[in-house]
């Protein structure tokens, strides 16, 4: 099956700093999503982005499908950005998402 | 409010017991999914359903069963055949097979 690797596995930032999270995948995808899991376990959808670039406030994402990677940018980080960020992909026109192991982000004052 | 609800928030299972986790959505989504998350890990797909009265096995279906009798409901039963059921269970739904998946708040299952 498809492999999904996320980096870095852990990240500590000072409030106000910027960061880039990376997701590499091993095959062509028709579905790629970024999620944020808060400390209570709730998974929040950030972007549906199988290709191209999208922005939502302080967050933006870019997927280069031909090179099989996606990047999530967080600017001016806040303590509420803390949690785990997951990349998930699906292939072959289906909806069976395969998740990476996530990036654990902690934003400190 | 539109959304996905899961109940209970916490569930305790005794050895040899079957338990059922509830998932309800009022988003009018066709597709629904069940995932399992173990500590420090990503989510793994247990079962999914693209339409009423139809469902497919995911990557880790052994020891689990589901039904999809109504569009808005997709309950998951953790059977006694599941030898390591302690985990966080998340339900999701999407409008269509390639659309964004939205998640419920999850159920934490613990074995006594």
Image (cartoon, helix red, strand yellow):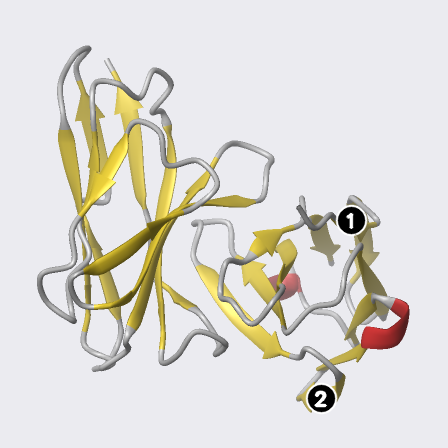
Residue B101: x and y in percent read 44, 70
Q: Residue at x 58, y 44 (%)?
A: B42
Q: Considering depth in this image, is B19 or A41 the residue closer to the camera?
A: B19
Quarter occupied by residue A19: bottom right
Residue A2: x and y in percent read 70, 50
**Which quarter of the rendering shows the C terminus of chain B?**
top left
Residue A35: x and y in percent read 58, 64
The tag on residue B12 is none
For residue B106, above or below residue B110: below
Q: Considering depth in this image, is A94 or B78 the residue closer to the camera?
A: A94
For residue B64, above or below residue B97: above
Q: Residue at x 68, y 77 (%)?
A: A50
Judged left or right of residue B102, residue A28 is right
Q: Residue at x 17, y 14 (%)?
A: B14
Judged left or right of residue B88, residue B37 is right
Quarter occupied by residue A46: bottom right
Check disc 2 and report its element: helix, strand or loop: strand
The answer to which of marks 1 and 2 sits earlier in the sequence is 1
Crowd around label 1: few <14 · some 14–19 · many ≥20 (10 Å): many
Quarter occupied by residue A73: bottom right
Foreground tag (1 vs 2): 1
**Which quarter of the rendering shows the N terminus of chain B?**
bottom left
The tag on residue A5 is 1
Residue B16: x and y in percent read 16, 12
> So how many labels did they put on this image?
2
What residue did someone put label 2 on?
Answer: A54
Chain at tag 1: A
Residue sticking out furthest to the left: B69
């Amino acid at each position: 099956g498809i492999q999904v690797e996320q980096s870095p596995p852990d990240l500590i930032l000072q409030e106000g700093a910027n960061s880039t999270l990376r997701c590499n995948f091993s095959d062509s995808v028709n579905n790629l999503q970024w999620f944020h899991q808060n400390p209570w376990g709730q998974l929040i959808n950030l972007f549906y982005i199988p290709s191209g670039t999208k922005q939502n406030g302080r967050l933006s994402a870019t997927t280069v499908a031909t090179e099989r990677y996606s990047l999530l940018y967080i600017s001016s980080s806040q303590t509420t950005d803390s949690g785990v960020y997951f990349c998930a992909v699906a292939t072959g026109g289906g909806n069976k998402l395969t998740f990476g192991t996530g990036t654990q982000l902690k934003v400190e004052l | 409010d539109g959304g996905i609800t899961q109940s209970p928030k916490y569930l305790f299972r005794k050895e040899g017991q079957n338990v059922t986790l509830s998932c309800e959505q009022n988003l009018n989504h066709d597709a629904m999914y069940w995932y399992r998350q173990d500590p420090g890990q990503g989510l793994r797909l247990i079962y999914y359903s693209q339409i009423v009265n139809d469902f497919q096995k995911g990557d880790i279906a052994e020891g689990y069963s589901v039904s999809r009798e109504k569009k808005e409901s997709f309950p998951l039963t953790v059977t006694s055949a599941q030898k390591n059921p302690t985990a966080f269970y998340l339900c999701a739904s999407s409008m269509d097979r390639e659309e964004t998946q939205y998640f419920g708040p999850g159920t934490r299952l613990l074995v006594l």
